[in-house]
Amino acid sequence: MPWEGNAERVDIFLISAIAAVGIYSLALLPLTPSLVGTHPVILELVRGSTSAIVTMGAESRIGQASLVVTVLAAIPGLMLFDWVYWWAGRRWGRAGLDFMLGNHPKAAKRVAQIERVFERYGWVALLVVYFQPIPNPLIYAAAGWTRMRLSTFLILDLIGSLAWIALLTALGYAIGQRAVDVAHSVSHYALWATIGLVVLVFAQQIWRQRRAGA
């Protein structure tokens, strides 16, 4: 665990929050193909989905959506849990990053890489967080680890998120009708794909149980 001695309430809260973020993301994953062509704005709000932002940009091109709504709806979905990782880094320091990386064979190397990034670029790392290879939660935790104030973190996080949203929106706007058609096709077949996936999972479990009992 990333703390020494007995866990305090804030430690339990942060561990639970990080676990809840993972569960939340997995729970919403099946919604992406069904909502991207029917209700992309909802997908933006709850998940900050890349495909939803591109679709909304495309719908703005053909007059079915507003560019302002496209941008504003994506902000909550992208930033919803970023503060949790900042707080974890603030609370636990380097140990927080080690905890998030787990037993990754290159964990120590990755933490050292993040440390060098913040030493060299500092707050710029948050502005380009969506355009670099390090997982975003580690960057957010590093911001807390380096004692960045929450207000500063949220402002920089907002600017970085807006840069990403602007790029995706512009991409969808440039593609236009073709992107909308693809999104509608994905949503049309999403139900059958989801049913097929559920059947496959159940069939695999039954096959494993029979094999174990043989």
Image (cartoon, grey):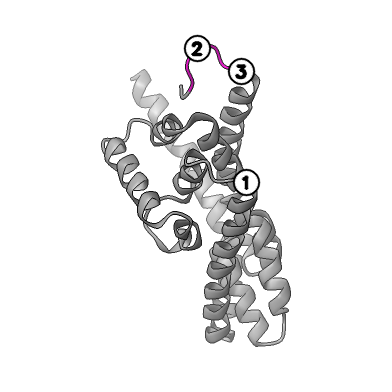
Q: Which mark is residue 5?
A: 2
State yes or no: residue 76 in magenta: no
Q: Which amino acid does label 3 sit on?
A: Glu
Question: Which mark is nearer the camera, 1 or 2?
Answer: 1
Q: Residue 4 carries which label?
A: none
The vertical placement of 61 against 40, above or below, is below
Q: Residue 113: x and y, percent?
A: 31, 47
Q: Which mark is residue 150?
A: 1
Q: Which of 115 and 199 is in front in this view?
A: 115
Q: Which amino acid does label 1 sit on?
A: Leu
Q: Residue at x 72, y 82 (%)?
A: 64
Q: What residue type is labelled 2?
A: Gly
- Left of 108 or right of it: where is 153? right
Secondary structure character of the magenta stretch overall:
loop
Q: Which residue is drawn at 56% across and 28% down?
A: 15
Q: Mark 3 points at which residue?
A: 8
Which quarter of the figure is the C terminus placed in?
top left
Local secondary structure at mark 3: loop
Q: Residue 9: x and y, percent?
A: 65, 20
The vertical placement of 139 against 21, above or below, is below
Q: Which residue is drawn at 61% across and 78% down?
A: 57
Local secondary structure at mark 2: loop
The vertical placement of 1 against 198, above or below, is above
The vertical placement of 50 against 83, above or below, is below
